[in-house]
Image: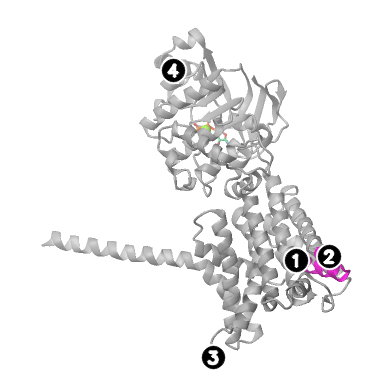
Amino acid sequence: MGSLLTLGTLQTAMELGFIYSLVALALFLSYSMLNVCDLSTDGCFILGCAVGATVAISGHPYLAIFAAMGAGVLSGFITAQLQTRFGIESILAGIIVNTGLYTVNIFAMGNRSQISLNATDTVFTKAKALLAGTPFADYYKLIVAVLFVVAAAVLLVMFLRTRLGLSIRATGDNVDMVRASSINPARTITVGLCVSNALTALGGCLLGEYQKSSDIQVGTGMVTIALAALIIGETLSRGHGGIGRRVVFVIIGSCLYRIIMAIAMRLNMPASALKLVSAVIVAVAIAMPYVKQSLSDHRKKQAAMRISEEETEDVKC
Amino acid sequence: MLTLKHVTKTFHPGTANEKRALNDLSLRLETGEFVTIIGSNGAGKSTMFNAICGTFPVDEGAIFLDGKNMTGLPDYRRASVIGRVFQDPMKGTAPNMTIEENLALAYAKGTRGPLAFALNKKETGFLRDSLAEFGMGLEDRMKTKVGLLSGGQRQVVTLLMCTIVPPKLLLLDEHTAALDPATAQKVMEITNILVKRHCLTTMMITHNMSAALTTGTRTIMMDDGEILFDMSGEQRANTTLETLLSMYSAKKNQTFDTDRMLMPD
Ligand SMILES: Nc1ncnc2c1ncn2[C@@H]1O[C@H](COP(=O)(O)OP(=O)(O)OP(=O)(O)O)[C@@H](O)[C@H]1O
Ligand SMILES: [Mg+2]
């Protein structure tokens, strides 16, 4: 094995990193901003994939994108209603919707658990045709992924700077203050989850078209993966700076995660070990800031202990 | 302006913890009145504010603001006309958002479409100038997260958030209790200025009895979920701290726990 990464694997990692970063951005909105742990993410990702694939197969490659996002909005809406109208704990609401989505997703794929997009026109095949013969021909997948993510990120940042976006951020921060500012938190949670799930579904749709297949398994563990990407990004940005900066770091986090996974694969790990690798990455990413803080506290304590020792000795003499 | 009609609220009814926090409370405020409210810990002062703001539904009675029955409205709907500084400095602001963002959210209160940008240059300038009036140097920290401020500084930001769009009713729950004496005085001065400038109908809870008598136009003492006495004008002007205390003991007909009443402000 020459190097850990070839240019080809790096490119694939970046492509996947960008596509999956849409889900990380979704969690950035629901988890970091709204403080809601949305466990319907897995199901919603497959929903986007399934709906997108079905619509694309029926001959509408562009409509597929919007249909997938629309389905995501619906799914987010239901999760939000369960929370705000029926008082179901947010984690439970996500689990319930996730469970129900399994059936919906099978249904969306025409009662199959897998459909192929091999002969279907998608945004990727369109881009491939468009870029054929240009110097960018080899990068068409990366270009499509980057374009979608940049558009989504710019819109997300702009959205978070609006009055509604600001109220969504405040809802996760201090719900009393939100009410006192005459904003209905049920509404901000609903809008937030709709937007967030639209992003998740968009990610699913793009992944399906990228892999040329939609599969009921494709979203399994998506929450963990996206959370890892999100936390790597948030750790790198240390939560400092404006929303724009943090969003960029979330995308970087997603790409980094994919690169780490690519390296793991190059090390000839069996496919079944990859889940463990990703679990370890998540745990390490989450624990890192805490461990760093503890270590520095420990050093300070040690230093403090030394001071008192010396002083007691002085008194004795 | 504000009317409370026979408002009753019992917490944990039917349990060992049953507590009648508001007992058939009736009160009427005219526009522009500035009422100070005193009473021992647990008298039901904050609970009365919660009832007015709609934090919980009341068991009995009704609440009117500007002739409109508000009793059935959710808290966030009432908040469009009520400004409130909570007793707890942590409650009024969002800690992970900057001073500027907090103020912007309050400033946009019901005035603009949800998809309008929350902050533009002109407004940042206005918000900054408004904060500068408090003379605490916070205007130089507009991009600081509110969670990094001290409790007192957070209360000042909250006070500005409550008044930046003049509300119909301003509720201040011991809003200077967390401040150092000099700042407390400063904030009290600014409160008076803001109340006068916008002609705000105001209710202010305080444990500082002399401040209660010298600030505003009317003073109410609460005890055990009821209004013990309510005075204004001549009668209030002639009341000293001593008469206030003796009035309280007479009403309560029991020894007065001075320590409890004269909580340092
Ligand atoms: N949410 C609640 N649940 C149960 N009991 C409550 C609740 N809020 C208030 N109480 C009870 O109601 C009574 C009045 O409380 P309240 O907070 O109104 O007092 P207060 O007059 O504001 O006192 P302080 O001067 O200490 O702020 C207290 O006995 C309190 O235990
Ligand atoms: Mg109180």
Q: Which residue is mark 3?
A: A2
Query: Label 1 is found on which chain of the structure?
Result: A
Specify the amino acid type for callout 3.
Answer: Gly
Residue at position x 73%, y 52% in the image: A80
Query: Label 2 is found on which chain of the structure?
Result: A
Residue at position x 42%, y 13% in the image: B243
Q: Are marks 3 and 1 in contact (CB under 8 Å)?
A: no
Q: Which residue is mark 2?
A: A104
Q: Which residue is mark 1?
A: A43
Specify the amino acid type for callout 1.
Answer: Gly
Q: Nearer the viewer, mark 4 or mark 1?
A: 1
Give the numbered dot on residue B123: none
Q: Secondary structure at mark 1?
A: helix
Q: Position of residue A296 (x, y in %)?
A: 37, 65
Specify the amino acid type for callout 4.
Answer: Thr
Give the numbered dot on residue B214: 4
Q: Position of residue A257 (x, y in %)?
A: 58, 73
Q: CA distance from mark 3 to mark 1?
A: 39 Å
Q: Position of residue A103 (x, y in %)?
A: 83, 67
Q: Quadrant of residue A306?
A: bottom left
Q: Position of residue B162 (x, y in %)?
A: 55, 32
